[in-house]
Image (cartoon, rainbow, N blue to C red):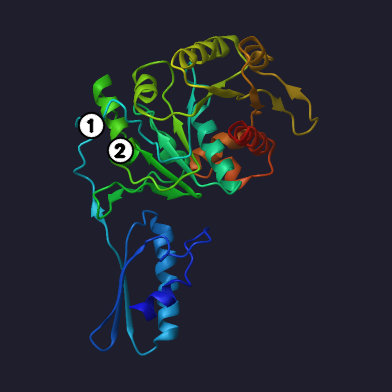
């Protein structure tokens, strides 16, 4: 087996510097009978990357052992029977997600401000800076992360410890209730069921070592926010708003709530700040101007950035290829890169 492992150690996980053996993705690698080599992989949830790895294994093994038949398979443990409504007992002094360096919740006082788009974009921007990043979709009633991250057809499975493995794309480890739902199926749950499912995503998902975990909260100031504050290690929150009055009034409510819960507010991010005409470069403030700056000054909360309006944001989100991944040089993407620099500085002060 050692000879086979030496070959497998030369195969990197796509978009990563570490090899598949180091990642613990090789369950077994054996010579079978006289003319066959069997490689069994595990802990891979991205099927496109599995196919890429499989192709590379077949290529390298066939080159090393041309007289052998090579078989590669992926060990998958179904999690379709996971009960997302069961009670999860947590010790009173235990804070969930304590193994992750920095846990950041992203919230808003109201819907329609692009909070999920902001969360996804911040996560990808952080990953592009070289950090290990996760994304937890806690918007149980309206999970949109699978669509925006191009993973809505993926289905999670469990490892040998019966832990659910996160779905991976764009270098982000993520989990959402959307992966467990049939298409067009609404979540019609009351508060206790929602908070129970959220706790399971914190306790029963095999989150790897991460530098940052972004949590996409549902809008408002309800059960999910309180559950996280009481049960999880939240190192800070980012509030998303738009410049218009109705949005920043609700953003203020979010800031006050998290301050009362003793959760630090890392900063405020103003989304859809303006539209810059591509012909004249003139900025048009479609939703008003100055709301984010006003809240920032009044409540002594840093303004992390102002993200402009760009039609490509919607197009790329619907296609499952976020603008920051496809157009990293766009003004929208650059605003997110500058914002994550401020987030990193906040934790390194």
Q: Quadrant of residue 341?
A: top right
Q: Is residue 304 above or below residue 165?
A: above
Measuring from the top left, give residue 4's x and y in whole percent.
37, 78
Measuring from the top left, give residue 89's x and y in whole percent.
22, 30
| Residue for badge 1 | 88
Q: Residue at x 29, y 77 (%)?
A: 30
Give the label on residue 341, or none: none
Q: From the viewer's perspective, is 101 left or right of 343?
A: left
Q: Is residue 56 above or below residue 216?
A: below
Measuring from the top left, give residue 238's x and y in whole percent.
54, 25
Q: CA distance from mark 1 to mark 2?
A: 8 Å
| Residue for badge 2 | 203
Count of number-bearing discs: 2
Report helix, strand or loop for mark 1: loop
Task: Evaluate whether residue 183 shows in this view.
Answer: no
Q: Quadrant of residue 64?
A: bottom left
Q: Residue at x 39, y 47 (%)?
A: 167
Q: Quadrant of residue 338?
A: top right
Label 1 with label 2: CB-CB less than 8 Å? yes
Measuring from the top left, give residue 72's x and y in whole percent.
32, 71
User: Closest to the observer: 317 or 94?
Assistant: 94
Q: Residue at x 39, y 28 (%)?
A: 139
């Amino acid at each position: 087996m050692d000879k086979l492992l030496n070959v497998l150690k030369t195969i990197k996980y796509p978009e990563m510097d570490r090899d598949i053996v180091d990642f613990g993705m090789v369950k077994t690698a054996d010579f079978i009978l006289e003319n066959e080599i069997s490689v069994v992989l595990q802990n891979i949830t991205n099927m496109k990357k599995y196919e890429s790895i499989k192709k590379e294994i077949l290529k390298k093994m066939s080159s090393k052992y041309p007289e052998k038949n090579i078989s590669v398979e992926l060990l998958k443990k179904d999690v379709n029977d996971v009960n997302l409504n069961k009670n999860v007992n947590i010790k009173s002094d235990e804070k969930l997600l304590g193994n992750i360096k920095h846990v950041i919740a992203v919230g808003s006082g109201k819907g329609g401000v692009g909070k999920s788009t902001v969360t996804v974009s911040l996560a990808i921007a952080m990953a592009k800076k070289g950090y290990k990043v996760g994304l937890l979709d806690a918007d149980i009633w309206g999970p949109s992360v699978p669509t925006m991250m191009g993973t809505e057809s993926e289905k999670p499975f469990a490892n040998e410890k019966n832990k659910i493995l996160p779905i991976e794309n764009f270098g982000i480890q993520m989990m959402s209730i959307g992966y467990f739902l049939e298409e067009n199926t609404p979540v019609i749950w009351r508060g206790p069921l929602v908070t129970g499912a959220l706790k399971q995503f914190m306790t029963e998902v095999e989150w790897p070592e991460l530098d940052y975990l972004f949590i996409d909260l549902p809008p408002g100031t309800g059960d999910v926010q309180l559950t996280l504050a009481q049960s999880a290690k939240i190192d800070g929150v980012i509030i998303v708003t738009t410049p218009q009055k109705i949005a920043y009034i609700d953003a203020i409510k979010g800031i006050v709530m998290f301050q009362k819960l003793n959760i630090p507010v890392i900063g405020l991010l103003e989304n859809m700040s303006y539209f810059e005409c591509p012909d004249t470069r003139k900025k048009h403030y479609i939703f008003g101007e100055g709301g984010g700056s006003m809240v920032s000054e009044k409540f002594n909360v840093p303004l992390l950035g102002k993200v402009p309006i760009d039609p490509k944001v919607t197009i790329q989100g619907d296609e499952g290829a976020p603008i920051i991944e496809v157009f990293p040089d766009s003004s929208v993407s650059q605003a997110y890169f500058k914002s994550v620099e401020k987030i990193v500085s906040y934790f390194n002060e």
